[in-house]
Image: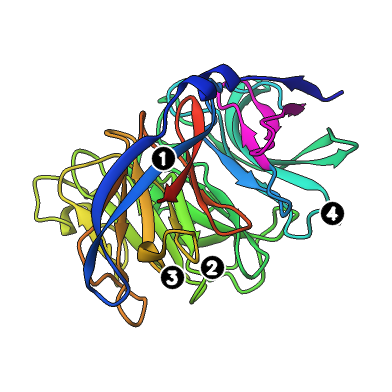
């Protein structure tokens, strides 16, 4: 049965719009003053770190610590429990971390979730899926599993169907850098490219599930709607948060030789076979970089075509211009808004608008 709740409605009524006035360059390059507001969609939620949209605009989100899969109507604020995934371990950076809907939705109502779970005396990061009938989830199935580290960190968790209708999955290195360079059956420190049944997709570079490797940990990747290229944000250790242009079979160099005492960004991109792919942009000191998404007719015209990304440390949202070929950046990132809490996921609605989540809420970026 679907449970209807009114989580966050009082908080929404009491919470004023958070406003940031910032100078943003227009597409012609001339700066002008624009006001970007953070509009709460729902607050008072319980760890909605990951969310996505159905084609009709309904938000599907996860409660990270409980394994609850919920829907939220951004207009009426109706909040429904669809399914609860059992055995979730939400310690540290574990939990229900990523959600995606079948690209054939609503013809094929299948929900995919990346989640840390206990089972059989072991702790696993799993990709699972279930069917939805009459608004309720049924038939949970585990598609793949990877050992979760005894340290509750670097589990990754971002999942997203690409323009090719393949499912891309980020698994963190498990807090052990050597995993990122191990291309055997070790999926940690990798981006995977999968068919909807969880098997490796045709055309993968190593005849397995692996698409790229040498990754540390990531909470965000997104496809450029103009080129279909994959852009990933990646967390550094005490240095070098990155934005990477992901390529088939590429080694991004994270591994056992990493060191923040060496020149940046080479010091954290120096392991495994050459060529090693360096970030297209990096932060020498960490910001806790998280979700990212492109503004493509997002209702904030001065951001059109730019990459927008968040950070968990200070709750800042930044935007950055791509170059003409859209293979790198032509400007430095700049802060466009500051959220009330750390930013987790950044997503695009079916109408193109930018939304993001934090520990207790989901918000939308608007311009006035």
**Residue 108, which numbered label?**
4
Disc 3 crowd, CA 10 A, few/some/many (<14, 14-19, 20+):
some
- In-front residue for pair 145/308: 308
- In-front residue for pair 298/117: 298
**Residue 38, which numbered label?**
1
Vertical order, 2 against 24 (above or below): above
Which callout, 4 or 1, points at the residue further toward the start of the chain? 1
Q: Position of residue 17 (x, y in %)?
A: 41, 33
Which callout, 3 or 2, points at the residue further toward the start of the chain? 2
Quickly name the residue at label 2.
206
Disc 4 crowd, CA 10 A, few/some/many (<14, 14-19, 20+):
few
Residue 220 visible: yes
Give yes or no for contact between labels 3 and 2 (Cβ–Cβ under 8 Å): no
Quickly name the residue at label 3.
247
Which callout, 2 or 1, points at the residue further toward the start of the chain? 1
Q: Secondary structure at mark 1?
A: strand
- In-front residue for pair 116/55: 55
Q: Position of residue 111 (x, y in %)?
A: 74, 44
Question: Separation of disc 3 and disc 2 at Cα?
Answer: 13 Å
């Amino acid at each position: 049965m679907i449970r209807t709740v009114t989580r966050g409605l009082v908080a929404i009524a009491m919470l004023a719009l958070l406003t940031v006035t910032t100078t943003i360059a227009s597409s012609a390059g001339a700066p002008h003053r624009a006001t970007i507001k953070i509009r709460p969609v729902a607050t008072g939620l319980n760890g909605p770190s990951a969310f996505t949209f159905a084609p009709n605009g309904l938000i599907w989100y996860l409660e990270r610590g409980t394994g609850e899969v919920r829907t939220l109507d951004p207009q009426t604020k109706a909040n429904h429990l669809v399914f609860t995934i059992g055995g979730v371990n939400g310690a540290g950076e574990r939990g229900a971390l990523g959600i995606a809907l079948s690209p054939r939705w609503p013809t094929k109502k299948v929900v995919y979730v990346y989640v840390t779970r206990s089972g059989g005396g072991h702790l696993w990061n799993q990709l699972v899926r279930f069917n939805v009938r009459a608004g309720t989830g049924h038939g949970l199935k585990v598609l793949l599993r990877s050992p979760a580290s005894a340290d509750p960190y670097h589990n990754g968790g971002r999942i997203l169907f690409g323009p090719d209708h393949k499912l891309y999955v980020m698994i963190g290195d498990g807090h052990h850098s050597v995993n990122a360079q191990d291309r055997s059956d070790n999926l940690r420190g990798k981006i995977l490219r999968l068919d909807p049944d969880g098997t490796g997709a045709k055309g993968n570079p190593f005849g397995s599930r692996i698409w790229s490797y040498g990754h540390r940990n990531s909470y965000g990747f997104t496809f450029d709607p103009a080129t279909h290229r994959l852009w990933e944000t990646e967390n550094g250790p005490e240095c070098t948060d990155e934005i990477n242009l992901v390529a088939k079979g590429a080694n991004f160099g994270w591994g056992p030789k990493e060191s923040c005492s060496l020149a940046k960004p080479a010091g954290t991109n120096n392991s495994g076979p050459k060529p090693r792919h360096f970030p297209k942009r990096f932060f020498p000191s960490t910001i806790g970089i998280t979700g990212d998404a492109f503004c493509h007719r997002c209702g904030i015209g001065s951001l059109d075509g730019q990459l927008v990304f968040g950070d968990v440390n200070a709750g800042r949202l930044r935007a950055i211009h791509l170059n003409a070929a859209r293979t790198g950046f032509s400007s430095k990132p700049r802060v466009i808004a500051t959220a009330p809490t750390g930013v987790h996921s950044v997503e695009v609605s079916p109408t193109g608008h930018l939304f993001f989540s934090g520990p207790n809420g989901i918000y939308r970026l608007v311009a006035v």
